[in-house]
Structure formats: C-alpha cells, structure tokens
Image (tube, grey):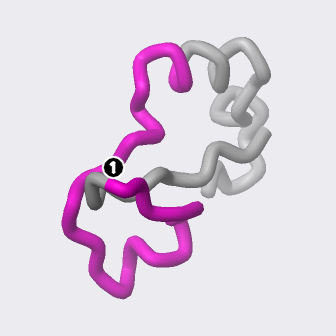
Amino acid sequence: MSAGLETFALKEEDAIKLLACQTHVGAANCDFQMEQYVWKRRADGLFILLCII
C-alpha cells in the first residue's frame, strides 16, 4: 500500500495510537472491496478491521 516508501510504513507506535482511537471499529455495512480488511463482526453488527503490524 505504501509502495515501499519508508515514510509510510506502519510503525508499532502508530498502530497503538490507531487502536486507542478505535479506528479498527468499522461500520455496519461491508461491501466486497472491504471484505479483505475485515477480521470479524461483533454481536452488535459492527465490523472489526484488521490491524497488522
């Protein structure tokens, strides 16, 4: 996704901040383009997105 640029590489510190802000909690709707980024679906219907370090 970052096309190999070191500047855009995900760092552990950045991933922790993203998790703290709950950016990994997606929407209730999911289309075929989003499916590759979905980890699972919560009981309330919201999709949890993958956060890979």
Q: Residue at x 69, y 27 (%)?
A: 7
Q: Position of residue 12 (x, y in %)?
A: 78, 21
Instruction: Name the image quarter holding the C terminus.
Output: top right
Question: Crowding at label 1, few (<14), some or many (≥20) Cα neighbours within 10 Å?
Answer: some
SS state under label 1: loop
Magenta stretch, main secondary structure, is loop
Residue 30 rendering spot, x and y as whole percentages: 29, 73
Q: Could you tell me which residue is drawn at 41 percent across and 55 percent down?
A: 42
Q: Which residues are magenta?
A: 18-43
Residue 42's place in the image compared with 53, above or below, is below
Q: Position of residue 40 (x, y in %)?
A: 53, 63
Q: Where, quadrant-wise, is the N terminus in this rendering?
A: bottom right
For disc 1, the marked residue is: 26
Identity of the residue drawn at 50% across and 52% down: 49
- Name the residue nearer the viewer: 17 or 43: 43
**In-image side of 11 versus 1 (left or right):** right
What's the amino acid at mark 1? Gly
**Relative to the observer, which residue lies in front, 37 or 2?**
37
Q: Quadrant of residue 28?
A: bottom left
Residue 33 in the figure: left or right of residue 48: left
